Image: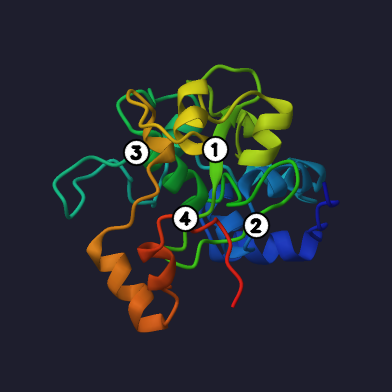
Amino acid sequence: MARAKPISKEDVLRAMKQTRSVMSAARYLNCSYQHLKPFMKAYKDEETGMSLFDLHKNQCGKGIPKFMSNSPFGKKIPAIEEIVNGNADPSPFTPDKLKFKMVEGGYMIEECYWCGFNSKREIDGKIPLIMFFKDTNKHNFKDGNAQLSCYNCYFIRLGNVFTERDMESLEGHQTVYKTTDAIDFKLDDFHMKQLDELGLRDKRVEDDPYSLVSRKG
């Protein structure tokens, strides 16, 4: 992994003047909460002797609107700061919602924790990342325990990405049932239209039952 970029005390103090919590300061400095935390703990306030982290942390959320409110779609979204502090149960929320709020809140960077991979798929801007937990406890979001891994690093370090039935369906010539949703690569009409407009759709491949994964010419 690449070495993390250091954050100066001056930058931290500047962020503190503009924000009301450590999480907000991380967003202001365009870094993750876990990246900023050790620097803020190392720097001391000259008047009080407290670390800048302890001085600026806002566990009560004073002056900050709560995330746990009705969304435009009429569904609840995670109060991510409460979940990270261990004061709220993450189980009512889907992994997609939790990942989104973790990245939005600056608690995770949208890239592979191991190798830094962050390339987006052109069609929809998605990055192939899987959330994992260092201590394997899927309820523990404290202290950077939840991270993101690319498929390759997940396979090498943690385990299989696809089941045996998934692989049989992907590589075999017969239809295999009871596979996971992870291997459903079909595009809907909207995405097909986008490919047509961008000139990226090769209808020769679609009409050729013997076409390979890649094609020259």
- Residue 192, relative to residue 61: is it above or below? below
Where's residue 86, x and y in %? 48, 24
Disc 1 marks a residue whose amino acid type is Ile
* Discs 4, 2 touching: Cβ within 8 Å: no
The mark that comes first in sequence, 3 or 4, is 3
- Considering the image in quadrants, where does the C terminus appear? bottom right
User: Which residue is labeled 4 in the image?
Assistant: 210
Residue 180 has which mark?
none
Q: From the viewer's perspective, is the residue at label 3 or at label 4 nearer?
A: 4
Label 3 secondary element? loop
The mark that comes first in sequence, 1 or 3, is 3
Residue beneath the point at 49% across and 50% down: 105
Find the distance from the CA under tag 4 to the CA under tag 1.
33 Å
Label 2 secondary element? loop
User: Which residue is labeled 1 in the image?
Assistant: 130
Find the distance from the CA under tag 2 to the CA under tag 1.
20 Å
Where's residue 35, x and y in %? 71, 47
User: Which residue is labeled 2 in the image?
Assistant: 31
- Residue 46, relative to residue 135: is it above or below? below
- Check disc 2: other Cα within 10 Å, few if <14, some if 14-19, many if 20+: some
The mark that comes first in sequence, 4 or 2, is 2
Q: Nearer the viewer, residue 171 or 59?
A: 171
Q: Nearer the viewer, residue 190 or 174?
A: 174
User: Which residue is labeled 3 in the image?
Assistant: 78
- Check disc 4: other Cα within 10 Å, few if <14, some if 14-19, many if 20+: few
Q: From the viewer's perspective, is the residue at label 4 or at label 2 nearer?
A: 4
Label 1 secondary element? strand
Find the distance from the CA under tag 4 to the CA under tag 2.
47 Å
- Residue 150, relative to residue 142: is it above or below? below
The mark that comes first in sequence, 3 or 2, is 2
